[in-house]
Amino acid sequence: SGRPFVKTGPTSVRCSGGETMQLLPGARDVLHRLRTDPSWAGTKVAVASCCAYPHWAEELFDTYELEPGMKLREAWDMIVIQGSDKQAHFKKISAELQVPYDEMVFFDDWIHNIERVGYLGVTCVHTPSGMNNQCWQEALQRFKARGKGKRRRSR
């Protein structure tokens, strides 16, 4: 059926159905900050995704640019795309990146995922309208309230 994504601009793609996809500005800002701000040096960043077509998600990471010249794939230390639930994703991320659950932060728009991952001890923030600076600040406050520093976090 052909490639599912076509690059239409420096930071946007069009999927085969005609919809234009862009990373939410808040998500882009946070990822950019995590990758360029020296105060976040050493922070581990991961993505945990469930989808029906993992190979399409992989292609999206290779097509979409976080910023001109930086593929979205390069923004992550680890990408987990599989059909299992988020707990399985986080178990894999924790093991491979050697980051304990209580040193992770997770953002998701599905409350079920927030509940499942929170059960592991991860600081979770529900983002029903997508990632934004308010969600980021809420995560930092919750993480700090749990007595954690700001050296290592995962998504």
Image (cartoon, rainbow, N blue to C red):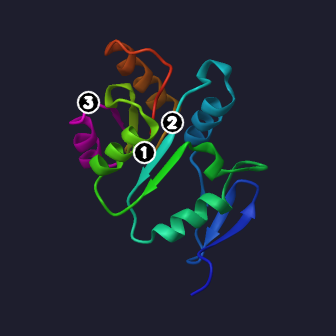
Q: Residue furthest right?
A: 69
Task: Give the residue drawn at x 51%, y 36%.
Answer: 132
Give the side of residue 79 with respect to residue 60, left or right.
left
Q: Are marks 1 and 2 in contact (CB under 8 Å)?
A: yes
Q: Badge 1 is on which residue?
A: 129
Mark 1 vs mark 3, CA separation in Å: 24 Å
Relative height, residue 120 to residue 54 (above, below): above
> Please, what secondary structure does the residue beneath circle 3 have?
loop
Relative height, residue 69 to residue 118 (above, below): below
- Figure quadrant of the C terminus: top left
Mark 3 vs mark 2, CA separation in Å: 23 Å
Give the mark, 3 or 2, whose residue is nearer the N terminus: 3
- Can residue 111 be found in the magenta stretch? yes
Q: Are marks 3 and 2 in contact (CB under 8 Å)?
A: no
Q: Badge 2 is on which residue?
A: 132
Give the side of residue 47 with respect to residue 13, left or right.
left
Give the side of residue 82 with respect to residue 67, left or right.
left
Q: Tell me which segment is drawn in magenta.
A: 109-126
Q: Amino acid at mark 3?
A: Gly
Q: Are marks 1 and 3 in contact (CB under 8 Å)?
A: no
The label number, if any, that marks residue 34 in the structure image: none
Q: Amino acid at mark 2?
A: Asn
Task: Give the residue drawn at x 73%, y 65%.
Answer: 8
